[in-house]
Image (cartoon, rainbow, N blue to C red):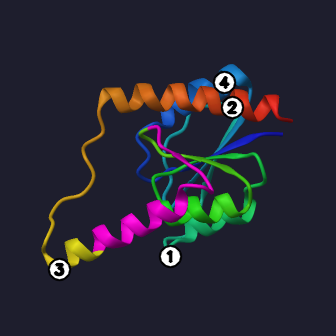
């Protein structure tokens, strides 16, 4: 059965995922380094892992299966989940695929290098209302696509 995994520590769209998952009767597993409040639902589970570097990512990769959906802005995690044939969606509605992940990883490295050199400052643009709307639309389409291909 299709499950949704959320890289939950800094995810701004948890409530949106809960609503969509409820509509489709899907299980949601939040993976975090610390306890967080979640809705009382047998479809929602919080998995608290230790605080080691990438421990939440490792847990997700160890449990995700083909055609599950992972919600994360973490590009290396996205690449690892794609290797397991999962679907990956960023909180701003960006779909990570096997076709685009190489370019996204390369761009991430270049931007990191530029920041390290002091050539560029700042990070991603702040999360906006339009990002939330785009995310909801893409998540809905992704779920429908996965279900129709089963």
Q: Which residues are magenta?
A: 93-112
Secondary element under disc 3, as helix, strand or loop, is helix
Q: Which mark is residue 117?
A: 3
Q: CA distance from mark 4 to mark 3?
A: 46 Å
User: N-terminal of the two: label 4 or label 2?
Assistant: 4
Q: Which residue is mark 2?
A: 143
Q: Which residue is mark 1?
A: 52
Tell me whether the residue at label 1 lies in contact with that at label 4, contact meaning CB atoms closer than 8 angstroms.
no
Q: Quadrant of the N terminus?
A: top right
Name the residue located 57 percent from the left edge and 65 percent from the top edge.
57
Residue nearest the viewer, comparing 50 with 131? 131
Q: CA distance from mark 2 to mark 3?
A: 41 Å
Residue 81 percent location from the top left of the image: 65, 59
Name the residue located 50 percent from the left edge and 53 percent from the top edge.
35
Between tags 4 and 3, which lies in front?
Answer: 3
Residue 143 showing in the rendered view? yes
User: N-terminal of the two: label 2 or label 3?
Assistant: 3
Q: From what the image shows, is residue 139 above or below residue 71?
A: above
Q: Which residue is mark 4?
A: 22
Q: Residues within 10 Å of mark 1 (few under 14, many from 20)?
A: few
Q: From what the image shows, is residue 19 above or below residue 119?
A: above
Between tags 2 and 1, which lies in front?
Answer: 2
Name the residue located 52 percent from the left edge and 71 percent from the top edge.
54
User: N-terminal of the two: label 4 or label 3?
Assistant: 4
Q: Would residue 100 appear left or right of 45 to someone viewing this image?
A: left
In the image, residue 22 lies in the stretch drawn in magenta: no
């Amino acid at each position: 059965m299709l499950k949704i995994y959320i890289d939950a520590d800094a995810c701004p769209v948890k409530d949106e995922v809960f609503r969509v998952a409820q509509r489709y009767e899907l299980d949601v597993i939040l993976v975090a380094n610390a306890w967080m409040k979640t809705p009382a639902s047998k479809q929602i589970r919080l998995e608290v892992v230790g605080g080691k570097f990438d421990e939440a990512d490792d847990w997700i990769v160890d449990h995700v299966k083909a055609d599950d959906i992972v919600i994360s802005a973490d590009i290396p995690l996205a690449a690892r989940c794609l290797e397991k044939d999962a679907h990956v969606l960023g909180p701003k509605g960006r779909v990570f695929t096997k076709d685009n992940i190489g370019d996204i990883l390369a761009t991430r490295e270049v931007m990191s290098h530029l920041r390290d050199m002091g050539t560029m400052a700042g990070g991603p643009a702040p999360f906006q209302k339009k990002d939330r709307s785009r995310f909801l639309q893409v998540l809905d389409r992704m779920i429908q696509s996965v279900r129709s291909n089963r």
